[in-house]
Image (cartoon, helix red, strand yellow):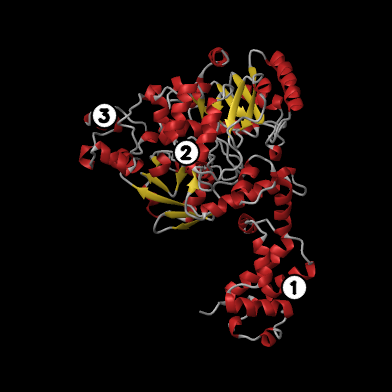
């Protein structure tokens, strides 16, 4: 089977990129890059040409012509194979990220040791890319957005990414059609971690065929010039993950009433009568499995969702829990579910001592501004060299600063914590005489993530059994849509936490949400405390706790079993009891 021109050009381009990445002779890789560029417009099949014929093409020299012939015969050529043999496969994927060329990829690889897109994403999220020569905060955010876009192209999106668009659209709809009702249904109504489409339910008959003029009115009413998006969820704001104008970049199919964004997601508009709105919202907002378990059909509708559940002999299930998991088997009273207003403290946060953007004082002052009672500083530990992890002398320095700030900021309190790396054998990476000085220790796996379940469990269980572990951090290490977590036995981990009095982190960053909400009800059953932690690397990161609360509600997280819903006195007593 002959090799088409596109495949040949891609092979030449790959060689040019890898040769530049490995700093080979610039005349050589520039020749291949130039040859590939000139060959893009050639219509004649390159695989049919002899080397002498290829040399007649402008920009094609002997080495390029020879490579084309070799690749046409075997789909490889020696020079490319040699480079592939010494290049981590993840670097090739990194070369495909918009805004990254071979030189930048090499810098990231050499200075941070990053060789996968997933790790690059994590580094951007943790503000580590700004440490690399030639990279600033703006470049870091551009790369982060490019990675997000590449994953969004698969048709699924993080809730946090869609929320600014969805909520701005709702604001606009309510501004233009104030007497009508509007609500997003489906996955968005349940605030699912990952969403594939947005479906807007509206009673505005004009939206049967939205016109450009109507869209301009909606955009104007929705605040189309905004850069940062804030939304009330109980109390407080949800930060936007990257600077955007949420009402720009849309195209519309007026007849179908569908809006498509240049980033790949769509808003489908469904118009219903006022009398049907609540029923259609209930049916579309619940997962099919939930309705099946409820034994529901449209004839069962009682005018509102509360009466409908009551008629079925089932207690009210809040919208976020209508997933068809175990919400009816393990019901939780609505009043018992964690709400954002219940959060009293913010734990697991990074500062400029390691890879954060804000100082300890700045982090503390903002925690006070959002009415928290206490703050847990948990910078990276000494093993995390990539994140400027704290050697012992830096720990002592930070302790002194925290002591001084606590005197100034009383009654607000900063707790001295650390995010201690779980080593390959399950040990934490400080000696006991250091660990015992921390108020709290978040134990997390950051290295050697490619593990069997047996290996992962050995590491985690040993860390959980360490008497200095307060909280098990992001238990699987997953990044939603980007990296599967290492395999673990969730029930065994939760059992171990229960046996050792260790709290379980629900990492609230919307790209983690780890522990998965599907296991929270088991933690509740076993009496394990769950800590909704933002893993903040900047002060605005605190606001990600909203996503943690939403995810926790899905799993039935109770306020009474949420560690950072304890008030300051209760939390101090909890820590003191742990140290006995």
Q: Viewer-nearest of labels 1 and 3?
A: 1
Residue 351 falls left or right of residue 446: right
Q: CA distance from mark 2 to mark 1?
A: 49 Å
Q: Which tag, 1 or 3, sits closer to the chain's start?
A: 1
Which of the numbered marks, if any, corresponds to residue 488?
A: 2
Please, what secondary structure does the residue beneath circle 2 have?
loop
| Residue that badge 1 annotates | 31
How busy is the neighbourhood of tag 1: few (under 14 within 10 Å), some, or many (20 plus)?
A: some
Please, what secondary structure does the residue beneath circle 1 have?
helix
**Where in the figure is residue 54, as x and y percent of width and height?**
67, 84
How busy is the neighbourhood of tag 2: few (under 14 within 10 Å), some, or many (20 plus)?
A: some
**Where in the figure is residue 60, as x and y percent of width and height?**
71, 79
Q: CA distance from mark 3 to mark 2?
A: 33 Å
Q: Residue at x 75, y 19 (%)?
A: 400
379 in relation to 43, above or below? above
Residue with the most extreme left position:
299
Q: Nearer the viewer, residue 459 or 387?
A: 459
260 in relation to 246, above or below? below
Q: Nearer the viewer, residue 71 or 559?
A: 71
Q: Residue at x 49, y 48 (%)?
A: 157
Whether residue 18 is visible here, answered yes or no, is yes
How busy is the neighbourhood of tag 3: few (under 14 within 10 Å), some, or many (20 plus)?
A: some
Q: Which tag, 2 or 1, sits closer to the chain's start?
A: 1
Tags 1 and 3 touching, CB below 8 Å: no
Dividing the picture into quadrants, the one containing residue 308 is: top left
Q: CA distance from mark 1 to mark 3?
A: 71 Å
**Where in the figure is residue 163, as x and y percent of width and height?**
50, 41
| Residue that badge 3 annotates | 314
């Amino acid at each position: 089977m002959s090799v088409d021109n596109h495949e040949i050009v891609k092979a030449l381009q790959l060689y040019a990129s890898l040769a530049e990445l490995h700093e080979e002779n610039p005349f050589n890789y520039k020749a291949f890059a130039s040859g590939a560029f000139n060959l893009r417009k050639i219509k004649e099949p390159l695989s049919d040409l002899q080397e002498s014929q290829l040399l007649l093409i402008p920009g094609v020299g002997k080495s390029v012509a020879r490579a084309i012939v070799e690749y046409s015969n075997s789909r490889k050529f020696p020079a490319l194979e040699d480079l592939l043999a010494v290049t981590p496969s993840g670097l090739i994927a990194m070369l495909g990220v918009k805004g990254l060329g071979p030189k930048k990829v090499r810098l990231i690889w050499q200075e941070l040791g990053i060789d996968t897109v997933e790790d690059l994403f994590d580094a951007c999220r943790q503000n580590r890319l700004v440490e690399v020569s030639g990279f600033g905060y703006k470049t870091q955010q551009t790369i982060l957005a490019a990675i997000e876009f590449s994953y969004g192209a698969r048709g699924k999106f993080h809730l946090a990414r869609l929320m600014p668009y969805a909520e701005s659209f709702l604001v606009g709809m309510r501004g233009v059609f104030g007497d009508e009702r509007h609500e997003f249904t489906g996955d968005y109504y349940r605030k699912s971690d990952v969403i594939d489409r947005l479906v807007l339910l509206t009673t505005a008959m004009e939206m049967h065929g939205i016109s450009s003029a109507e869209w301009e009115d909606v955009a104007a009413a929705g605040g189309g010039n905004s850069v940062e998006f804030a939304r009330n969820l109980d109390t407080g704001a949800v930060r936007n993950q990257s600077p955007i104008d949420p009402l720009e970049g849309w195209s519309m199919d007026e007849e179908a009433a569908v809006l498509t964004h240049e980033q790949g997601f769509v808003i489908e508009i469904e118009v219903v009568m006022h009398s049907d709105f609540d029923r259609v919202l209930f049916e579309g907002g619940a997962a099919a499995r939930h309705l099946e378990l409820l034994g529901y059909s449209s004839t069962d509708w009682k005018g509102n969702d509360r009466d409908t559940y009551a008629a079925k002999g089932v207690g009210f299930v809040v919208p976020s829990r209508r997933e068809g998991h175990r919400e009816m088997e393990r019901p939780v009273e609505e009043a018992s579910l964690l709400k954002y207003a219940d959060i009293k403290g913010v734990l697991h946060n990074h500062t400029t001592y390691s890879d954060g953007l804000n100082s300890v004082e700045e982090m503390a002052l903002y925690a006070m501004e959002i009415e928290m009672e206490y703050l847990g500083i948990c910078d990276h530990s000494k093993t995390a060299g990539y994140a400027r992890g704290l050697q012992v002398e830096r720990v002592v320095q930070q302790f002194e600063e925290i002591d001084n700030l606590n005197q100034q900021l009383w009654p607000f309190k900063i707790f001295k914590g650390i995010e201690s790396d779980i080593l390959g054998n399950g040990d934490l990476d400080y000696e006991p005489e250091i660990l015992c000085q921390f108020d709290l220790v978040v134990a997390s796996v950051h290295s050697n993530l490619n593990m069997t379940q047996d290996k992962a469990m050995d590491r985690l269980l040993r860390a959980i059994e360490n008497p200095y572990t307060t909280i098990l951090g992001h238990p699987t290490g997953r990044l939603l849509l980007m990296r599967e977590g290492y395999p673990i036995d969730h029930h065994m981990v939760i059992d171990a936490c229960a046996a050792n009095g260790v709290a379980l982190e629900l990492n609230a960053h919307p790209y983690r949400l780890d522990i998965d909400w599907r296991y929270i009800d088991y933690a509740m059953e076993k009496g394990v405390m769950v800590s909704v932690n933002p893993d903040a690397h900047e002060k605005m990161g605190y606001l990600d706790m909203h996503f943690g609360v939403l995810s926790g509600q899905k799993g039935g997280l109770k306020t009474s079993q949420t560690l950072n819903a304890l008030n300051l006195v209760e939390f101090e007593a909890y820590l003191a009891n742990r140290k006995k």
